[in-house]
Every structure is written in C-alpha cells, then in structure tokens.
Amino acid sequence: MNKKEIQKSRMWQYFVEATASIIEEEGIEKVTIRKVGDRAGYNSATIYNYFSELSHLLFFASMRFLKPYTDEVTLNIKKGNNPIEKWLISWECFCKHSYHNPTIFHAIFIADLGDQPDKFLEHYYSIYPNDLINMPEYLKPILFERNISKRGRDFLELAVKEGMIAEENADGLNELTLLIWKGMFTNILNRRTNYTPDEAVAKTMKYISEVVLNQKYLNLKNGKA
C-alpha cells in the first residue's frame, strides 16, 4: 500500500475501534455517528468519507467481538469425525455465541447492509488478519460468507461429496435448520422468550439434531455416519 492507502486504513481502523469501545461500554443500540465522532475527535462528515452508513460501521465494529466465536468453532470442529458431526458442532457454536450476543450477531449477519455486503467480511479480515490465525484453510471460505444460508450450504456440500447426504436433500436440510435457528434467535433478540441463552442452545440443537438424523436426509443405511 502507498502512504495514502495506509493513512486511509488507519483512519478506518480508528473509527471502528472508537465504535467498538462505545458498544462495549454502552451497548450497540447507543451508538450514533455523533458519538463516534466525539470519541474519535472528528466530525460526522469525516466518518462518512469512510463508511456509507451507520450500519456499515456497526458491522465492522461488531466484528471486533466475533473472535471468541471463530476461535471456539475452529477448536471444537476438530472433534468431529465426519462432515455431519462438524456441521452440528459449528451450529452449536454459532447458536451459543449468537444467543449470548444477539445484537452483535444481528449487526453482522442479519442487518441490511445495502449493496455488496459479501465483500465486507473479506475487507475486515484484510485489515485484521490476526483474527484468522490457527483457522483451518477449509473453514476460511465458509466463515468469510456473511449469508447464513450459504454458510450452512457450504458445510453440507462436504457431506454431499462424502455421500452422507444426497444432493437433492441438501437444500431442504439447510433451510429447515436455518429456520429453527432464526425462530429462536428472533425471540431472543426481541426478548420474547424466557429461555436463558444456554437453554435456548440446548433446545435449538435438539431440534436441529432431530432434523439432521431424519432418514429422509441422512444416509445412515450405508453406514456413512
């Protein structure tokens, strides 16, 4: 990078870190462009030179809190003996962290970010490459994917290649498990459930496991799982 690009990158990080500090101290719902400007020592107009809208800034700042999730899924997924087990482990990690930090996960995976949101994760990790340390290469393309449906489908593709799931069943299985998570996540985000985060994880994984182990989807007859 030339000097101008380095300076732009530093300013970008400065605003992201200022936003992350507000999130940590006050909560994501308290973040405003004015507060970020005051914290960083710049006016609002300067911030808009680097971020098109507040949701983009919130996305990148929220990513600063995602590493505990990526670290845990990277560690735990090694315990899986096949793609289905690894997929279930990844779901459990995702449920655990999304239910404990619903506003953060909403900002990253659910919020409307406008055009080309898929490039945001790639841009983030280009600025913070240390967040990828110890992550297996096969996981990186999946974790770079913001679209939750595509993330799940990419995992299932590994199971399809090993003959554990028929190609024609993968989309249905992916959609059903995603709907289970979305239902619980929405209730937690909107505070419409009395479940604790851990209880919600247990409930969600019970339903997901029941769906996954259904003979309609999983090829148990051939002893693949």
Image: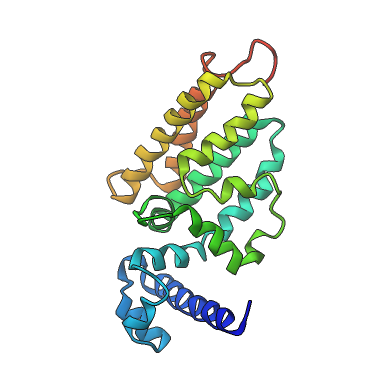
Q: Give the position of the N terminus as an image quadrant.
A: bottom right
Number of numbered discs overlaid on the protein picture? 0
Q: Residue at x 35, y 56 (%)?
A: 114
**What percent of the width, then of the height, locates residue 25?**
41, 74
- The structure's colour scheme is rainbow
Residue 42 quadrant? bottom left
Q: Nearer the viewer, residue 49 or 184?
A: 49
Q: Nearer the viewer, residue 192 or 59?
A: 59
Indicate whether 48 appears above or below 166.
below
In the displayed image of the protein, which residue is found farthest to the bottom?
41
**What percent of the width, then of the height, locates residue 48?**
36, 76
Residue 23 quadrant? bottom left
Indicate whether 220 appears above or below 43.
above
Q: Residue at x 32, y 76 (%)?
A: 33
Q: Residue at x 27, y 45 (%)?
A: 192
Q: Residue at x 59, y 80 (%)?
A: 6
**What percent of the width, then of the height, locates residue 52?**
36, 68
In the visual, does 44 lie left or right of 17?
A: left
Residue 132 quadrant? bottom right
Q: Give the position of the C terminus as an image quadrant.
A: top right
**What percent of the width, then of the height, locates residue 133?**
70, 60
Q: Nearer the viewer, residue 138 or 210?
A: 138
In the visual, does 57 lie left or right of 163?
A: left
In the displayed image of the protein, which residue is found farthest to the top?
221
